[in-house]
Amino acid sequence: MLKKKTIKKTAETEVTFEFAQPGIKSVSLVADFNQWQPVTMKYHKKENAFRTKVKLPGDKTFHFRYLLDETIWENDHNADDYVPNPYGSDNSVVYTKIKK
């Protein structure tokens, strides 16, 4: 799940990435904005979900995926869009449109 909050003062968008699936022990966010290096997402027991927040430049497009238990690739089912990647699957896409 994606939640977005516009930060007008800095022309950024704070994006909350959230992933929930029973039986998963770890989730990492892997994206073009972090040079495709896995960033471990924090588990929130109350919501039974993994979550992380990232500030991204506004009016841009970013590709990302989730890496589950360090072996399984998964997309965000609520992504803004999906685009094919060179590995025969799709990347999730998030748009950081600045609200005026």
Image: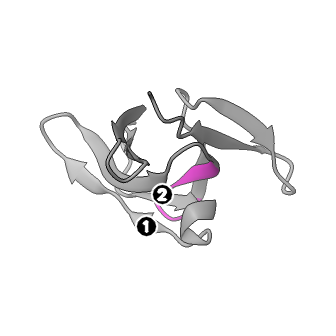
Instruction: Tell me the residue that label 2 is attached to.
Output: 29
Q: Above or below — where is 90 with respect to 40?
A: above
In front of the other: 31 or 90: 31
Q: What stretch is highlighted in magenta?
A: 62-71
Residue 31 locus on image (x, y percent)? 58, 59
Picture layout, residue 2 above or below residue 51:
above
The residue labelled by disc 1 is 39
Q: Tell me the element at label 1.
A: strand
Callout 2 secondary element:
strand
* Prevailing SS of the magenta stretch: strand
Report whether residue 22 is seen. Answer: no
Please report contact status of discs 2 and 1: CB closer than 8 Å, yes or no.
yes
Report the residue at 57% width, 63% height from top: 33
Q: Is residue 90 in sight in this rendering?
A: yes
Residue at 52 percent across and 26 percent down: it is 78
Taking the spot 38% from the left edge, 48% from the top edge, the residue there is 24
Going by the numbered disc 1, the residue's amino acid type is Val
Badge 2 crowding class, 10 Å Cα cut-off, few under 14, some 14 to 19, many 20 or more, is many
At horizontal 39% and vertical 55% (from top left) the residue drawn is 55
Q: Earlier in the sequence, mark 2 or mark 1?
A: 2
Which percent across, then down, holds residue 66? Answer: 53, 51
